[in-house]
Image (cartoon, grey):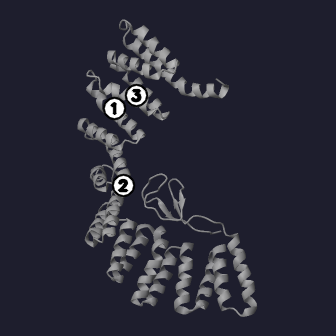
C-alpha cells in the first residue's frame, strides 16, 4: 500500500474507529459491571472494523445495542458516516438492523425511520423513502423533518397536488417561507392546464397562487397570456403592469409583450406616457433599449437619438453608447456612416459578456428564465440581470 492509498484509508477508517471507541466508553459508563462477554464481542467487532470487514463488525455492534439502547446515538452517528462516505448499503444495514429489533424503544422509532428514509433518498429510492417519512408522521404528526422531506420528494416527482397538501399545511406555521412555494406549485399546475388548453384551470390555479403569494409574478404572467389569447388586451396590460409592484426586477421580461398589447389597441400615446413614468420610477438600464425602439417606431429615429443622448448623460455606459451609435448611423449622411459603424463595432467588442438571468441565492447563471433554480432548487430566485453594462 503506497502513502496515498494509506492516507485515503485512514480518512475513511479513523472516524469509524473513534466512534467505536466511543461506543465502548458509553457502554462501560452506562453498565459499570457490563454484561458477560461484552469485552470479547466489542473487541471482536473492533478487529473486524480494522481489517475492513465492516459487514461483520456491523452485525456485532447492532447486537450490542440491544443490550443497552442508551448507546443507540452512536449507531446513528455511524450510519451518518457511512452515508456521507457513499456507503449507503452499510448505512441501510445499520438502520434496518435497528428497526427490526423487537426491543426497539418507542422513543427511538421515529429517529430510526428518519435515518433509514435518508438512506433510501441517498440510494435514489424515493418511493421507499416516501413510505418511511409517512410512517414517521404516524408516530409524530408534527414532524417538520418528515414533512419537508416529503415536499422535496413530491417536487422531484412533480406531484404538485401532494406537494400542495403538505406545504399548505405547513403554511400556517411558516407563511413567509411556504407561501411563495405553494404559489409556485399552483403555477406549475396552471402550466400543465395551459398545455392542455384548459383555460378555466389555468385561471383557477393562477388565482390560487395569489392566495398564497399576492406578489406572484409568474401568476400575473400566466393571466396576462390567457388574456392575450382571448384578445382582451386591456386585461393583459393590467396584469403586466401589476408586476411593477410585485417585483419590478421582472419588468424587462414582460415589457415587449406589454408594448405589443398597446400596439394592438393603437394607443401609442398611452404607451409612451407609461414608459416615461416607468423609467422615472425604475431607473433600470434594461428598459433603455425597448424605450428607444418604441420612440423610433412612433416618433422617428431622431427621437430615439435625443432620448439616448439624455440617458448617456444620466447613466454613462458602453451599452448606451453602442445603441446611440447604431441609431446615429441610420440618420447621418454617408460621410459619417463608416465612422459610426466602426465605433459601434468597437463598443460591441468592449462590452463584457454576461448571462441574462442569475440566481440571487447561489449565483447560477442562464440565458433562460427558470422559476426553480436548477442548481440550488430554490423557487423564484432567478431574476433578470443587467447585461453588458459598464
The answer to which quarter of the image holds residue 363 is bottom right
Q: Position of residue 79 (x, y in %)?
A: 42, 29
For marks 2 and 3 on the same chain, the one whose residue lies earlier in the sequence: 3
Identify the disc placed on residue 111.
Answer: 1
Mark 1 nearby-residue class (10 Å; few <14, some 14–19, many ≥20) = some
Q: Residue furthest left?
A: 138
User: Residue at (47%, 71%) from the top-left corner?
Assistant: 253
Residue 312 vs residue 126, the one in the foreground: 126
What label sits on residue 4 in the rendered view?
none
302 sits left or right of 243 in the view: right
Rendered-image quadrant of the C terminus: bottom right
Q: Are marks 2 and 3 in contact (CB under 8 Å)?
A: no
Q: Which quadrant of the figure has residue 11?
A: top right
| Vertical placement of residue 35 versus 154, above or below | above
Residue 183 in view (yes/no): yes
CA–CA distance in space, label 3 to label 1: 9 Å
Image coordinates for residue 265, horizontal then vertical, percent? 39, 88
Q: Compared to 361, does 225 lie above or below?
A: below
Residue 176's disc number: 2
Which secondary structure, mark 1? helix
Observer-nearest residue: 10 or 21? Answer: 10
Label drawn at residue 76:
3
Question: Residue drawn 75% across and 84% down?
Answer: 339
Quick check: 78 left or right of 320? left
Amino acid at each position: 500500500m503506497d502513502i496515498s492509498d494509506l492516507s485515503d484509508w485512514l480518512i475513511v477508517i479513523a472516524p469509524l474507529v473513534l466512534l467505536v471507541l466511543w461506543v465502548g466508553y458509553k457502554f462501560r459508563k452506562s453498565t459499570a459491571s457490563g454484561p458477560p462477554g461484552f469485552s470479547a464481542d466489542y473487541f471482536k467487532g473492533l478487529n473486524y472494523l480494522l481489517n475492513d470487514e465492516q459487514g461483520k463488525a456491523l452485525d456485532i455492534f447492532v447486537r450490542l445495542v440491544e443490550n443497552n439502547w442508551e448507546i443507540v446515538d452512536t449507531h446513528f452517528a455511524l450510519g451518518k458516516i457511512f452515508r456521507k462516505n457513499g456507503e449507503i448499503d452499510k448505512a441501510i444495514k445499520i438502520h434496518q438492523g435497528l428497526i427490526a429489533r423487537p426491543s426497539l424503544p418507542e422513543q427511538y422509532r421515529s429517529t430510526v425511520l428518519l435515518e433509514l428514509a435518508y438512506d433510501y433518498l441517498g440510494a435514489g429510492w424515493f418511493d421507499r423513502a416516501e413510505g418511511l417519512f409517512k410512517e414517521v408522521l404516524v408516530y409524530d404528526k408534527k414532524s417538520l423533518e418528515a414533512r419537508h422531506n416529503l415536499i422535496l420528494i413530491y417536487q422531484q416527482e412533480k406531484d404538485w397536488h401532494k406537494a400542495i397538501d403538505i406545504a399548505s399545511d405547513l403554511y400556517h406555521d411558516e407563511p413567509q417561507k411556504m407561501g411563495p412555494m405553494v404559489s409556485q406549485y399552483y403555477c406549475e399546475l396552471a402550466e400543465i392546464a395551459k398545455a392542455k388548453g384548459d383555460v378555466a384551470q389555468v385561471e383557477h390555479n393562477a388565482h390560487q397562487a395569489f392566495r398564497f403569494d399576492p406578489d406572484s409574478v409568474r401568476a400575473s404572467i400566466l393571466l396576462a397570456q390567457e388574456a392575450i389569447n382571448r384578445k382582451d388586451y386591456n386585461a393583459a396590460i393590467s396584469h403586466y403592469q401589476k408586476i411593477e409592484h410585485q417585483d419590478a426586477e421582472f419588468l424587462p421580461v414582460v415589457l415587449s409583450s406589454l408594448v405589443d398589447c398597446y400596439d394592438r389597441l393603437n394607443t401609442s400615446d398611452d404607451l409612451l406616457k407609461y414608459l416615461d413614468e416607468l423609467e422615472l420610477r425604475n431607473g433600470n438600464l434594461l428598459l433603455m433599449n425597448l424605450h428607444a425602439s418604441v420612440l423610433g417606431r412612433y416618433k422617428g429615429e431622431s427621437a430615439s437619438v435625443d432620448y439616448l443622448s439624455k440617458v448617456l448623460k444620466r447613466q454613462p455606459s458602453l451599452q448606451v453608447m453602442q445603441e446611440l451609435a447604431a441609431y446615429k448611423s441610420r440618420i447621418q449622411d454617408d460621410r459619417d456612416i463608416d465612422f459610426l459603424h466602426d465605433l459601434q463595432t468597437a463598443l460591441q467588442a468592449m462590452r463584457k459578456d454576461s448571462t441574462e438571468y442569475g440566481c440571487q441565492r447561489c449565483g447560477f447563471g442562464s440565458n433562460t428564465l427558470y422559476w426553480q433554480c436548477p442548481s440550488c432548487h430554490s423557487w423564484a430566485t432567478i431574476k433578470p440581470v443587467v447585461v453588458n453594462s459598464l
